[in-house]
Amino acid sequence: MATPSALLDEISSMLIDCDLFNHLPPAELRAAAHYFSVSKINRGEVVFSEGDVGTFMCIVHEGSIAVIKENQNQEQVEMVTLGHGRAFGEMAVLDGERRSATCSAAQDSILLTLSKEAMDKMLEEHPRMAARIIRAIAISLSRRLRIRYSSACSRSSIRWASSPSSSRSRRA
């Protein structure tokens, strides 16, 4: 079994592969490592389900995670597969709300896990570092929303531009 110091070094090196943490200096990476745990999950194992109360976030170190949403026909649709260095479930450490999707292991995976309680403790013990991490999470979520919004607008303008009634209304 690894010594606590070796485990912290290993977690620190895992964190540097994630965009949410790679901006931190080495001393802060090591301090942040104290708040994480490492989990091994098997292919097909559910990390969390859509509708669950959010209590933690994860970073994929090895393997891959499928993000699955239920559509209006109550069918499970795989939205994306996340690989090495990608974070998921981040909203939970910010708001603790219910999960917006199901995440399951597409392959055997190793995850770094940060609980909401650990994030709250980090805020008390290392407020500047925690603030930088929260800001990185907010920027990441903002980028995803902008991409999704831009994509949705493009799809709706294509539909609007290609519908027969739209050409009549534009001529009027």
Image (cartoon, rainbow, N blue to C red):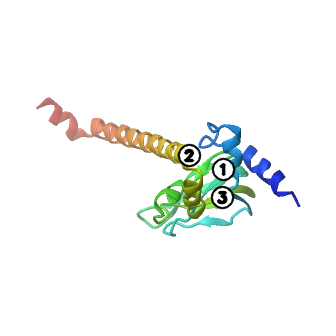
- Report, in whole angstroms, how far the alpha carbon at label 2 lies from the one at label 1: 9 Å
Assess disc 1: are there few (<14), some (14-19) or many (≥20) residues with their C-alpha within 10 Å of its C-alpha.
many
Nearer to the camera, 28 or 172? 28
Identify the residue at horizontal 75%, vertical 44% (top origin). Answer: 13
Task: Give the mark, 2 or 3, whose residue is nearer the N terminus.
Answer: 3
Residue 134 in sight: yes
Secondary structure at badge 1 equals helix
Residue occupied by mark 1 = 32
Q: Quadrant of the N terminus?
A: bottom right
Q: Is residue 13 left or right of 52 when viewed as pictured?
A: right
Identify the residue at horizontal 24%, vertical 39% (top origin). Answer: 164
Which amino acid type is marked by label 2? Ile
Residue occupied by mark 3 = 113
Residue occupied by mark 2 = 133
Which amino acid type is marked by label 1? Ala
Identify the residue at horizontal 15%, vertical 36% (top origin). Answer: 169
Is the C-beta separation of discs 2 and 1 under 8 Å?
yes
Outermost residue on the left side: it is: 172
